[in-house]
Amino acid sequence: MEKREQLYTGKAKTVYATDEPDHLILHFRNDTSAFDGEKVAQLDRKGRVNNRFNAFIMERLAEAGIPTHFERLLGDEEALVKRLEMLPVECVVRNYAAGSLCRRLGVEEGLALEPPVFEFFLKNDALHDPMINESHIRTFRWATDDEVVEMKDLSLRINGILTRLFADAGLLLVDFKLEFGRFHGRLLLGDEFSPDGCRLWDAETRTRLDKDRFRQGLGGVVEAYEEVARRLGIPLD
Ligand code: TMP
Ligand code: ASP
């Protein structure tokens, strides 16, 4: 397997083609962004910790029967994945109120959400990733009705698996974002799962150990990601 041309540069990852049409290489960079790319920084070791973190989570999900694009780690900052046709929607699951839910609905941060909340957002930075519903997805053909059902079902199953995994490490999985894509007629989990795209709080102190540290200028961003990795037993060297 050989690395070929750069296909796409996102805010935190670069995607490369390979000599195999069904495979891509994801390069996790040290770049960090928030507020739809308005706030950016370079954080030492972030690419490496997110690459390892993502590999660990994708492998745990695959073991639990979730279909994902992840194939294998290639190096400190790179992974081999299946090439998906990504759907332009983001799936968010929330177990505790935080972030945009608090702003939109005026609920108190930290409120336990039972059952968990599921939301769709349109993946579009220029429009600030607006919240959308199933009717928008159907009318604008962003996904089929079956894919909508499957994205919700998989997202909630993933929530069950990961809530337990993080709880065993003394962490609350507050919320997270997933992206799915098509691969030869099947829907697979794509993109990444890392502290860049979820909220994780210490279960006792509720200390933030995720990208809110960057959004809120709290410092110790990569140190927090490494602390989560350490608690999960993810090797970082
Ligand atoms: P929100 O509170 O800003 O709506 O975000 C909910 C969760 O989803 C939070 O863990 C961050 C994550 N998320 C992203 O990583 N990227 C996005 O574009 C969106 C909308 C959410
Ligand atoms: N990931 C998005 C961005 O880079 C949203 C966020 O995390 O705040 O702007």
Image: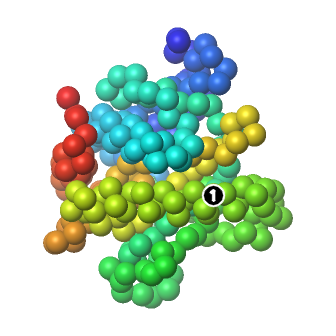
Q: Is residue 65 above or below residue 183?
A: below
State whether residue 130 appears in this view. no
Q: Image check: 166 left or right of 37?
A: left
Query: Which residue is found at the position 48% from the left and 75% from the top?
Result: 116
In front of the other: 91 or 122: 91
Which quadrant is home to the C terminus? top left
Q: Is residue 186 above or below residue 138?
A: above
Q: Which residue is mark 1?
A: 151
Determine if the C-beta at disc 1 is less than 8 A from ligand 1: no
In front of the other: 172 or 127: 172
Q: Secondary structure at mark 1?
A: helix
Location of ligand 2 given as a quarter of the image: bottom left
Instruction: Report the residue that reaches farthest toward the right.
Output: 139
Q: Image check: 220 left or right of 77?
A: left
Query: Which residue is found at the position 61% from the left and 69% from the top?
Result: 131
Query: Which residue is found at the position 60% from the left and 62% from the top?
Result: 153
Please state the total of marks drawn on the protein image.
1
**Image coords of residue 80 (percent x, y):** 49, 26
**Image coords of residue 124 (percent x, y):** 62, 55
**Image coords of residue 77 (percent x, y):** 36, 29
State whether residue 96 appears in this view. yes
> 10 Å neighbourhood of mark 1: few (<14), some, or many (≥20)?
many
Q: Amino acid at mark 1?
A: Met
**Image coords of residue 210 (percent x, y):** 30, 57
Q: Image check: 85 left or right of 157?
A: right
Query: Which residue is found at the position 42% from the left and 39% from the top?
Result: 59
The colour mode here is rainbow
